[in-house]
Image: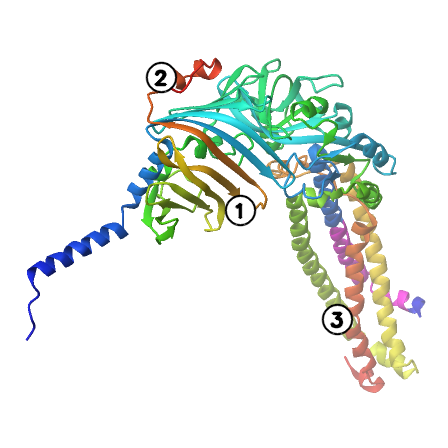
């Protein structure tokens, strides 16, 4: 039966090739677009999170919604060591943070001051690598800070200047310190560049009266998905300390919402594309069935059962789909592989992308999901639509069919 | 046929009527000015204790404060030792801080005026006792009540159209002897956000004074700051050097005359 269907296909090579081309192209387009999307989501997530947040964080229970310094916890090193032992998690960087007034001479600006462990911080955040003048903090630094570029500009601060820090310590007393600016960073994220001050954790703990305590641990690893997969284990470790784990979506709800919105609107596009392709194929198929009415009449007169004849046409359709979609997948894999390494430059995109910390080139990402979802949707929808010619053939009467044009 | 009312009676009626109208509806703006004046005088020297209360901790500190007119004020911490010496000077529109550990004066940006002062629930604006409430708001008299044998007036203040104000409304309760009994701040959606309550009125420096006041943050239960005025002198002659940067940095010894 399959051989018969196969032979039937190549009795009309031009039509078959054209149909195959349509299927292959449609398949390739869905694969490529989906790969592009998955790739840009992955870049968006990891680039945004790698700047400062980390792939996940361990925090005190209410800290996410009310990030005040008082919600701190002790013994961060012991916890960090235990968490770093979990496969998938690379680093757990301790941080303490508060808002304070930073000033130089007559200029004062409210800033987000974060105490960091320089070595661990380098593995979690890209800020240590985005130093634009001076240098990042080193182990052993004490009365020293690195500050964002826009903050430095607003204060009129250069590397080497001494700025003063004034805030409220954890016990409610006045916290004050004079610190030397070691470096100025340009992370590319305007809120960070305008607000963030990083100083050595130990100095922070002394200034703000929270010895040995931190507000959070920022986690990183080789990939977001591996860290994500390790979170249940992290949760198990920190639960006895009454701490909670915040995933990337909780840390960057805006990013998660943006991705979800983008994904749902593009699903509409994919659905319309699939529908158009299915209607196109159905049209060709019906035409060919009409054309071949006489042939079916002869087959039926020779004793072929009507559903066998109808099934034969359906198998022809399945063969077309298999061939076409495999071609499409091969074609798009090639494209994705090429652009995945070389990047796809979109004119005018850099400004929009920068706010999510994206480079101006997009890198499509090949995965089972991006490779198979589109073709599977096309195959399923077309195979289902094949019911229409199937029913049509089953209703044919041998004599009238043979008399047809 | 109607009997004409005797003239004398008519006059009496008028007199009573106009008197009662006067008693029932004082000018709300004048009420505010009087309450502010009662609170800070033309000048004042006060000694205070402050308790900052949070659900899981509380902190007590002591301070002294001088004010003159509507725009000059100096507040200095005297205890606990860790905070002693920290001071805030408001001079004209500018706000300055002095920290003894740094030995430095820091000028605060104007935007900080509405922020919490020294970790408390009072803002710099509250503390400086500015008359922004008089100048930037339109005032309407609200319902009148009774407390401790005094009449209590309510004044609803809505910001003037172009006033630099974040609140939707501010409501004050003022006793008929000009003592401020309470103040409630409403957000733009008219939800009450913070409340100042007078917990105790007592004679101080020769006037009835709200000696104990508590500021509460309404959406955070257990967050409040209490200010108790232990000593007060009003309308005294203050030396000009008090409200200068050099006195902020190097305080001259001063004792109430």
* Local SS, label 1: loop
Query: Label 1 near label 3: C-beta < 8 Å?
Result: no
Q: Chain of mark 2?
A: B
Residue A72 x, y percent position in the rendering: 70, 35
Residue B163 x, y percent position in the rendering: 37, 39
- Reading the image, the residue beneath label 3 is A287
> Label 2 crowding class (10 Å Cα cut-off): few <14, some 14-19, many 20+?
few
* First reached walking from the N terminus: tag 1 or tag 2: 1
Q: Which mark is residue A356?
A: none
**Whether residue A52 can be seen here:** yes
Q: Chain of mark 1?
A: B
Residue A28 colored in magenta in the image: yes
- A206 on left or right of A195: right
Quadrant location, the N terminus of chain B: bottom left
Query: Label 2 near label 1: C-beta < 8 Å?
Result: no
- Reading the image, the residue beneath label 2 is B239
- Reading the image, the residue beneath label 1 is B218
Marks 3/2: CA distance? Answer: 104 Å
Write down the quadrant of residue A11 in the picture: bottom right
Q: Chain of mark 3?
A: A
> Taking A136 as reference, is B115 above or below it?
below
* Local SS, label 3: helix
Residue B211 colored in magenta in the image: no
Callout 1 and callout 2 share a chain:
yes
Residue A9 x, y percent position in the rendering: 85, 65
Q: Which residues are magenta?
A: A5-31
> Taking B182 as reference, is B74 above or below it?
above
Marks 3/1: CA distance? Answer: 74 Å
Identity of the residue drawn at 23% across and 54% down: B20
Q: Closest to the observer: A252 or A94? A: A94
**Whether residue A154 can be seen here:** no
């Amino acid at each position: 039966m399959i051989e018969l269907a196969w032979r039937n296909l190549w009795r009309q090579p031009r039509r078959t090739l054209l149909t195959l081309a349509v299927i292959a192209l449609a398949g390739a387009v869905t694969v490529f677009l989906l790969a592009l999307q998955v790739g840009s989501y992955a870049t968006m997530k990891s680039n945004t999170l790698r700047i400062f947040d980390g792939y996940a964080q361990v925090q005190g229970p209410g800290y996410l919604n009310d990030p005040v310094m008082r919600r701190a916890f002790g013994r961060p090193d012991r916890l960090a060591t235990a968490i770093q032992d979990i496969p998938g998690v690379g680093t757990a960087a301790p941080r303490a943070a508060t808002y304070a007034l930073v000033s130089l001479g007559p200029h004062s600006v409210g800033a987000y001051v974060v105490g960091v462990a320089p070595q661990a911080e380098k593995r979690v955040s890209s800020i240590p690598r985005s130093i634009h003048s001076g240098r990042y903090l080193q182990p052993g630094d004490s009365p020293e800070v690195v500050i964002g570029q826009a903050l430095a500009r607003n204060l009129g601060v250069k590397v080497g200047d001494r700025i003063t820090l004034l805030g409220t310590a954890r016990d409610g007393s006045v916290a004050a310190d004079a610190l030397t600016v070691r470096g100025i960073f340009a992370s590319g994220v305007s809120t960070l560049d305008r607000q963030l001050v990083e100083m050595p954790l130990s100095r922070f703990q002394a200034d703000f009266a929270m010895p040995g305590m931190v507000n959070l641990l920022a986690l990183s690893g080789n990939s977001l998905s591996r860290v994500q997969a390790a979170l249940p284990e992290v949760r198990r470790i920190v639960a006895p300390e009454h701490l909670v784990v915040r995933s990337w979506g909780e840390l960057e709800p805006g990013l998660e919402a943006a991705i979800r919105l983008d994904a749902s609107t593009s699903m509409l596009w994919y659905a319309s594309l699939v529908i158009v392709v299915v209607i196109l194929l159905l049209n060709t198929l019906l035409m060919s069935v009409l054309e071949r009415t006489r042939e079916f009449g002869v087959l039926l007169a020779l004793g072929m059962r009507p559903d066998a004849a109808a099934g034969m046409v359906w198998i022809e359709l399945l063969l077309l789909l298999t061939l076409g979609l495999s071609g499409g997948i091969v074609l798009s894999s090639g494209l994705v592989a090429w652009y995945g390494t070389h990047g796809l430059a979109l004119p005018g995109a850099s400004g929009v992308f920068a706010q999510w910390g994206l480079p101006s080139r997009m890198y499509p990402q090949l995965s089972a999901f991006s490779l198979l979802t589109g073709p599977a949707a096309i195959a399923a929808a077309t195979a289902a639509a094949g019911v229409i010619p199937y029913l049509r053939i089953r209703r044919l009467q041998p004599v009238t069919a043979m008399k047809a044009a | 046929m109607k009997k004409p009312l005797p003239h004398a009676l008519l006059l009496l009626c008028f007199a009573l009527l106009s008197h009662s109208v006067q008693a029932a509806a004082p000018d709300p703006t004048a009420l505010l000015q009087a309450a502010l004046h009662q609170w800070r005088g033309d000048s004042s020297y006060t000694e205070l204790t402050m308790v900052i209360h949070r659900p899981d901790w509380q902190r007590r500190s002591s301070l002294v404060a001088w004010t003159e007119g509507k725009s000059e004020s100096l507040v200095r911490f005297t205890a606990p030792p860790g905070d002693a010496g920290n001071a805030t000077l408001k001079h004209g529109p500018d706000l300055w801080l002095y920290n003894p550990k740094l030995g430095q004066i820091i000028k605060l940006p104007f935007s900080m005026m509405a922020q919490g002062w020294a970790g408390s629930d009072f803002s710099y604006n509250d503390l400086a006792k500015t008359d922004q409430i008089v100048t930037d708001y339109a005032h309407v008299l609200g319902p009148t009540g009774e407390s401790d044998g005094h009449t209590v007036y309510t004044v609803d203040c809505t910001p003037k159209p172009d006033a630099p104000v974040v609140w939707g409304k501010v409501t004050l309760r003022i006793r008929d002897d000009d003592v401020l009994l309470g103040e409630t701040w409403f957000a733009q959606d008219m939800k009450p956000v913070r409340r100042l309550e007078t917990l105790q009125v007592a004679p101080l420096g020769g006037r009835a004074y709200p000696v104990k006041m508590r500021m509460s943050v309404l959406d955070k239960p257990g967050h409040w700051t209490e200010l108790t005025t232990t000593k007060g002198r009003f309308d005294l002659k203050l030396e000009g050097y008090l409200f200068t940067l050099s006195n902020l940095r190097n305080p001259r010894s001063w004792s109430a005359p």
